[in-house]
Image (cartoon, rainbow, N blue to C red):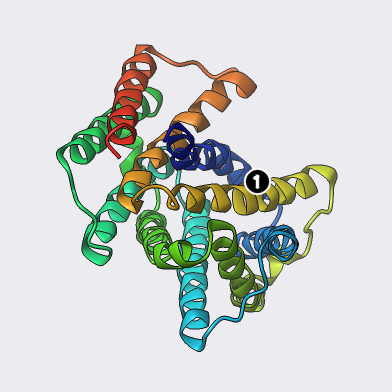
């Protein structure tokens, strides 16, 4: 049981990795156009995941229905990352951080309506605590009035991304039950490569000037590797791995850790300051996660 509880919490590692993704992505967009950066990320992720599946999973013969299910996950994935990368490029830090809090709400809602998961008091209470804790932390770190100062289009795209990631999470559950987290994450990623690839010419046609000076420096390569190896291959596997042992609506609570980790990295790496709200919010967040995790 203890082992299963630990594995059910692997999405927390995914949230930790994604905590640094906002900063890396925002910096990367100054060097590489957003959709092209997303394509590079997916290619690297697929190049890591596919050999891992071939080396560890048994040979499979998927039915047409199953391939359509994997294909649907690829569409959810493409929509989620496309709207996320473009939305992040258009928004400020306050908007980006606050809007990520919406993602678990979409996951929980879809988990209850699509998968018929139970919405227990512990799950509701824990999620509400975690959400409140995250909001307290963000309110203490950012200028809340700046939320209205960013791009409305960017904010709408981030909301769309949150919903699409909820779809990617929830509709992956049946395939995870039937096969594994690694196989589901891998085939969804591989099938999304041509979808992302098709967006690159569109981006070039809309803004050819952005492609005139795309650098291939070590920091840019490092950013692509971070996004591909960690934010894609490792994080998506960990996110799905948790759903081998817990409901999607229970896994969702770990997502609240993402903006908190991002702020912590800013303190450690950039010398940013935090106030007492960080400690108060952190206690609420930890209590909420513990309440949901021990209730499964």
- Whether residue 248 is situated above or below residue 141 in the rendered picture: below
Q: In this view, does 296 lie to the left or right of 151?
A: left
Q: Most extreme residue toward the left, as rendered?
A: 121
Q: Is residue 99 visible?
A: no
Q: Is residue 226 left or right of residue 114?
A: right
Q: Which of the 4 quarters of the picture holds residue 186?
A: bottom right
Q: Which of the 4 quarters of the picture holds residue 268?
A: top right
In what element is the residue under mark 1?
helix
Q: Most extreme residue toward the bottom, as rendered?
A: 64
Q: Name the residue under label 1.
A: 230
- At a point 42% along the width and 52% down the height, the residue shown is 243
Provide residue 96's location: percent of width, then percent of height. 43, 44
The quadrant of the picture occupied by the N terminus is top left
In the image shown, does 255 or 56 lie closer to the viewer? Answer: 56
Callout 1 crowding tier (Cα within 10 Å): few <14, some 14–19, many ≥20: many
Q: Most extreme residue toward the front, as rendered?
A: 1
- At a point 28% along the width and 58% down the height, the residue shown is 111
Q: Most extreme residue toward the right, as rendered?
A: 217
- At a point 49% along the width and 80% down the height, the residue shown is 66
Provide residue 133's location: percent of width, then percent of height. 30, 27
In the image shown, does 134 or 283 lie closer to the viewer? Answer: 283
- At a point 66% along the width and 63% down the height, the residue shown is 57
Q: Can residue 90 be seen in this view?
A: yes
């Amino acid at each position: 049981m203890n082992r299963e509880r630990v594995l059910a919490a692997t999405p927390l590692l995914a949230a930790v990795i994604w905590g640094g993704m906002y900063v890396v992505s925002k910096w990367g967009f100054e060097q590489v156009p957003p959709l092209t950066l997303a394509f590079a990320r997916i290619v690297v992720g697929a190049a890591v995941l596919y050999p891992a599946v071939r080396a560890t999973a048994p040979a499979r013969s998927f039915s047409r229905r199953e391939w359509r299910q994997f294909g649907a996950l690829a569409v959810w994935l493409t929509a989620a990352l496309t709207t996320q990368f473009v939305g992040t490029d258009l928004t400020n830090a306050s908007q980006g951080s606050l809007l990520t809090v919406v993602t678990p709400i979409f996951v929980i809602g879809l988990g209850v309506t699509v998968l018929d998961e139970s919405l227990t008091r512990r799950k509701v209470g824990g999620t509400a605590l975690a959400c409140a804790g995250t909001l307290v932390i963000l309110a203490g770190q950012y200028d809340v009035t700046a939320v209205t100062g960013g791009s409305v289009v960017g904010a709408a795209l981030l909301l769309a991304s949150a919903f699409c990631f909820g779809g990617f999470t929830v509709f992956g559950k049946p395939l995870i039950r039937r096969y594994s987290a690694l196989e589901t994450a891998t085939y969804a990623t591989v099938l999304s490569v041509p979808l992302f690839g098709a967006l690159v010419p569109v981006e070039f046609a809309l803004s050819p000037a952005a492609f005139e000076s795309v650098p291939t420096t070590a920091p840019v390569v490092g950013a692509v590797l971070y996004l591909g190896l960690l934010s894609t291959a490792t994080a998506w596997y960990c996110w799905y791995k948790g759903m081998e042992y817990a409901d999607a609506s229970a896994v969702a609570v770990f997502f609240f850790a993402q903006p908190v980790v991002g702020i912590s990295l800013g303190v450690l790496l950039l010398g940013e300051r935090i106030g007492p709200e960080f400690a108060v919010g952190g206690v609420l967040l930890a209590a909420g996660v513990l309440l949901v995790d021990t209730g499964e």
